[in-house]
């Protein structure tokens, strides 16, 4: 029951002026099962950002396939694809990416309002996810009024409020101090274990990776090695 299947994914960047090419992904294969919590690790330049950009639809692959929930992204029309991604994926970035002119509650409501949901449906969903993540008292606060850790929790709330099939996180603790990082990773574990959220997290930090169930190391654009943890080896 795979949420994500990446098959033989290749990305070659070309520089039209110099003619120099860089192969960022070289036939990468990856399967993420429903309910899994996977870390992608790898040195700088190994292709992590490229992989996430392709999954997010920010760039197109040179070859290979990306299947989400049994649907081949390449075979979908542009409009359907945007809607499909919005409904099925949630994103958390290193730098939070909250909108400064909106309160935390309004930021978190965005995926639902963009999807045309009504206010009487949006409000309880926002309150529910905020209390799950321990930030309900900041409903009417603006991002600059709360700490980095609270902003990142709001970003996580926005990423999961619509129950996506897959949560993608790009170095989510990169801008957090170590206490806030641990708190965030514990929240990821709680989302994964309690709600069953499937998580794919890119990180270069071994401590962050130790919170996941499975660690996939990539090197030179390919999967290099894998580590599957039993429940009692997971950090908490
Ligand atoms: P990571 O995120 O693991 O640091 P990247 O996906 O950013 O790795 O990069 C993988 C390889 O592709 C590197 O050699 C990088 O220089 C190259 N690369 C990434 N983005 C581009 C781009 N837009 N144009 C040309 N080369 C790129
Ligand atoms: P990260 O910190 O996530 O690994 P990088 O520093 O690898 O990000 O890359 C930052 C941005 O620059 C990305 O959008 C990536 O695609 C782009 N990039 C990386 N390497 C190159 C390159 N050699 N030429 C052009 N753009 C690149």
Image: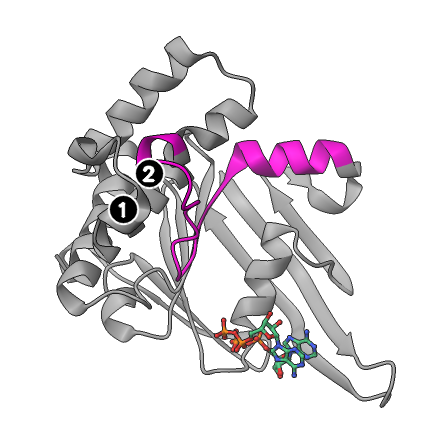
- Choose between 54 and 38: the one closer to the eye: 54
Residue 41 in sight here: yes
Disc 2 is placed on an element classified as helix
Q: Position of residue 20 (x, y in %)?
A: 80, 89
Give the magenta part as a residue range: 79-106
Q: Which residue is mark 2?
A: 157
Q: Is residue 21 left or right of residue 170?
A: right
Q: Are marks 2 and 1 in contact (CB under 8 Å)?
A: yes
Which quadrant of the view contains residue 193? Answer: top left
Q: Quadrant of residue 62?
A: bottom right
Neighbour tally class for label 2: few under 14, some 14-19, many 20 plus, Cα within 10 Å: many
> Residue beneath label 1, please?
153
Residue 6 x %, y %: 61, 55
Locate ligand 2 by image quadrant. bottom right
The magenta stretch spans residue 83 = yes
Above or below, 63 relative to 146: below
x 39%, y 43%: residue: 198
Q: Position of residue 171 (x, y in %)?
A: 38, 65
Q: Nearer the viewer, residue 198 or 124?
A: 124
Q: How far apart are the alpha carbons under marks 2 and 1?
A: 6 Å
**Quarter of the picture holding the C terminus:** bottom left
Asked whether mark 2 lies closer than 8 Å to ligand 2, one says no
Q: What residue do we see at 38% from left, 9% from top? A: 120
Residue at 49%, 31% (x, y): give it.
111
Q: How many marks?
A: 2
Does mark 1 have its CB less than 8 Å from ligand 2?
A: no
Vertical relation: 149 (above or below) 33: below
The crowd level at tag 1 (other Cα within 10 Å; few <14, some 14-19, many 20+) is many
Where disc 1 sits, the SS reads helix
């Amino acid at each position: 029951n795979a949420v994500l299947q990446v098959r033989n994914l290749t990305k070659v960047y070309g520089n039209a002026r110099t003619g120099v090419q860089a192969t960022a992904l070289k036939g990468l294969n990856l399967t993420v099962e429903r309910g899994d919590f996977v870390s992608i690790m790898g040195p700088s330049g190994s292709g992590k950002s490229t992989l996430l950009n392709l999954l997010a639809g920010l760039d197109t692959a040179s070859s290979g396939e990306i299947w989400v929930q049994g649907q081949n992204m390449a075979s979908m029309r542009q409009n359907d694809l945007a809607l499909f991604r919005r409904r099925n994926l949630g994103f958390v970035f290193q730098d939070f990416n909250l909108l400064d002119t909106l309160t935390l509650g309004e930021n978190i409501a965005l995926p639902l309002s963009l999807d045309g949901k009504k206010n009487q449906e949006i409000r309880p969903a926002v309150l529910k996810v905020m209390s799950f993540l321990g930030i309900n008292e900041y409903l009417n606060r603006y991002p600059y009024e709360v700490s980095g850790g609270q902003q990142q929790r709001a970003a996580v709330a926005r990423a999961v409020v619509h129950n996506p099939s897959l949560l993608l996180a790009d170095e989510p603790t990169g801008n957090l101090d170590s206490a806030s990082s641990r708190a965030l990773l514990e929240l990821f574990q709680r989302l994964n274990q309690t709600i069953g959220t499937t998580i794919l997290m890119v990180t270069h930090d071994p401590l962050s990776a130790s919170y996941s169930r499975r660690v996939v190391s990539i090197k030179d654009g390919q999967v290099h090695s894998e580590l599957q943890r039993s429940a009692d080896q997971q950090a908490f």
